[in-house]
Amino acid sequence: MMEDIQPLKSWSMVRDTPIAIAGPCSAETEEQLFQTCKLIKENIDITMLRAGIWKPRTRPGSFEGIGEIGLEWFRNVKKELNMPITVEVATPQHVELALKYGVDVLWIGARSTVNPFTVQDIADVLKGVTDVPVMIKNPINPDLSLWLGGIERIYNAGVRHIAAIHRGFSSHEKTKYRNTPMWQLAIDMKNKLPHIPMICDPSHIGGTRDLILPIAQKAMDLDYDGLMIETHIDPTNAWSDASQQVTPVRLAEILREVKIRKEKTDDTEFNSILDELRGKIDRLDKEIIESLMNRNKLVKQIGEYKRDNNVTAFQPKRWKAIQQTRNAYGKELGLDESFITQLFGIIHSEAIRVQDDVMNIEPEQAK
Ligand code: PEP
Ligand code: MN
């Protein structure tokens, strides 16, 4: 699908130099924007500068972006520092203005990707302007099809330089993150569109400065292609997202500290040890599948027994006991509790399905 998606124009796509995008959450004043970008450029070799010009805020009354004047400032920054610039666009008018002021790359924010009408409106004005790369953030809700749909709309407008930005998902569960990463969704996207550069936005996932480095490291370990990190000359006094922005000096430290691991290596000794360990994993996985098959046999037997004695497939007391004993044993052996809970959730619902099948077959049919 969409095999001809290209690396973003003029961006370094060499594996050991990830794409780095940095700049303030919002352009606030000409001085703040210029000084932030200048310090970034002086401290670290980045790919592109970012700034928010129009800010989609959850509640009215907070700073909603400086608007068109910010584009004028950003154009000057681009000229002075000789750096490509990127801004968020949420309406066709934003696209037109951004292009008028020479913005090099556009991005669609999480609150826009969520709405197919908005993405389509943006796609429609991009028809014929195919050389401007577009980055599409994940929608705020964890819906892979919606994210993919946003990318397809932009692709169908003729844009071929496309990237995805993973910025995490809203969740009703309280976690340490501002937006839960749900890494599996981004991995699934990578599997569907292997050509698409995947950029991680640890600032919006984490919501606090301290989480940026570990999230960025995790993204690099998952072979992401780049990072977008909100950077501000005076983070604590930023007009938006103050708790998650870092200074240019800290940004430089973070990008130096992140370890870039390679996807594969030609080292024969390394590869033979890896093959041996993988062989062991393959054997264990086979045993797990065989255990599941034996478990299923017992489940069927229980199903028949319950059917013949008119007993329900699902028995809450038994399910509780399964959860408690498996979690306790898992814990004893040092396994992650939520992993065991989820694993046995799946195993148990499969057991109910199998029993249900057995119980709904009449004994004569079953023979
Ligand atoms: C941003 O990058 O400043 C932004 C508004 O992000 P998101 O769309 O991920 O909330
Ligand atoms: Mn922000």
Image: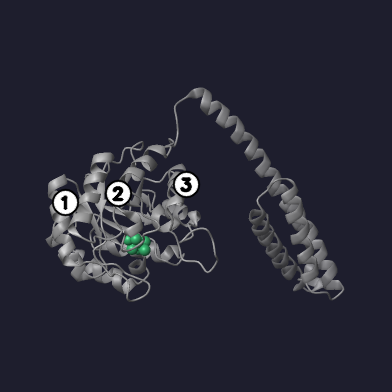
In the rendered image, residue 63, in percent from the top left (x then y), is placed at 29, 69
**The quarter of the picture showing ligand 1:** bottom left
- Left or right for 88, reference 82: right
In the rendered image, residue 43, in percent from the top left (x then y), is placed at 28, 40
User: Which quarter of the figure has residue 47?
Assistant: top left
Circle 2 — which element? strand
Residue under pointer 2: 21
User: Which quarter of the figure has residue 156?
Assistant: bottom left
What type is the residue that disc 1 sits on? Val
Residue under pointer 3: 214
User: Residue, x 32% and y 75% (percent of image)?
Assistant: 61
Badge 2 local density, few (<14 within 10 Å), some, or many (20+)? many
Circle 3 — which element? helix
Label at residue 326: none
In the image, is residue 245 above or below residue 287? below
- Left or right for 126, reference 252: left
User: Residue, x 21% and y 46% (percent of image)?
Assistant: 38
For marks 1 and 3, give the CA distance.
30 Å
Looking at the image, is mark 1 or mark 2 nearer the viewer? 1
Residue under pointer 1: 77
